[in-house]
Amino acid sequence: MYEITLKNCTFFAHHGVYEEEKKLGQRFFVDTTLKVDSWKALHEDRIEDTVHYGNVFGIIEGIMITSRRYLIEALAMDIAKGLCDKFPEIVQVKVTLKKPHAPVYGILDHVGVTVYYPEGN
C-alpha cells in the first residue's frame, strides 16, 4: 500500500447556496490523498500499473467545473466517488475542499471540509 497526494489543486467554479456564489463564482482548493494498493507499480516501475496523478487532476477538474453543488461536503464526496470509480486500485481517498471566500461574517483563511471514501478503511 502507498499514498499519492495532490495539494492545493486550484479551480474557479460556481458552487454555493447563495445566488451571488453561483453567478460570480470563486476559487476553490482541493487536496487529495489516495491510498493505493498496487505493488506491481512499486516493483515494475510502470505508469500503467499505478494511479496516474495527471488523470486524477483531470477528474477533479472535470467535477469542479462542470457540476453545481450547494454544499462543499457534497462536492468533496462527488470527487471522492469519481476517483474511486475510475481507479479500482484506490483503497480509500481523502478529499479536503477549501473555500477561501465563504460568505461568513468575519475574518478567516478559508472554510473547509474533509471526506473519506469509502468510509471505514
Image (spheres, rainbow, N blue to C red):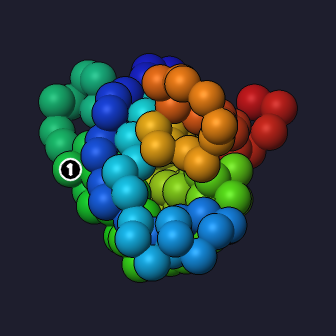
**Residue drawn 45% across the image and 69% down it:** 14
Residue 66 in the image: x percent, y percent? 41, 78
Asked if residue 6 is positioned above or below residue 13 in the image, the reply reads above
Report x, y in % for residue 97: 52, 41
Residue 11 percent location from the top left of the image: 31, 55
User: Looking at this view, is 120 or 112 the one in front?
Assistant: 112
Residue drawn at (56%, 45%), measured in percent from left and top?
A: 102
Query: Is residue 103 visible from the viewing direction of this image?
Result: yes
Question: In the figure, 89 relative to 11: above or below?
Answer: above
On the picture, is 116 further left or further right than 37?
A: right
The residue lying at 65 percent from left, 37 percent from top is: 105
Query: To which residue does mark 1 refer?
Result: 54
Task: Kindly identify the amino acid type of the residue bearing the numbered disc 1.
Answer: Gly
Instruction: Name above or below for residue 80 compared with residue 32.
Output: below
In front of the other: 105 or 117: 105
Please say whether residue 50 is visible from this viewpoint: no
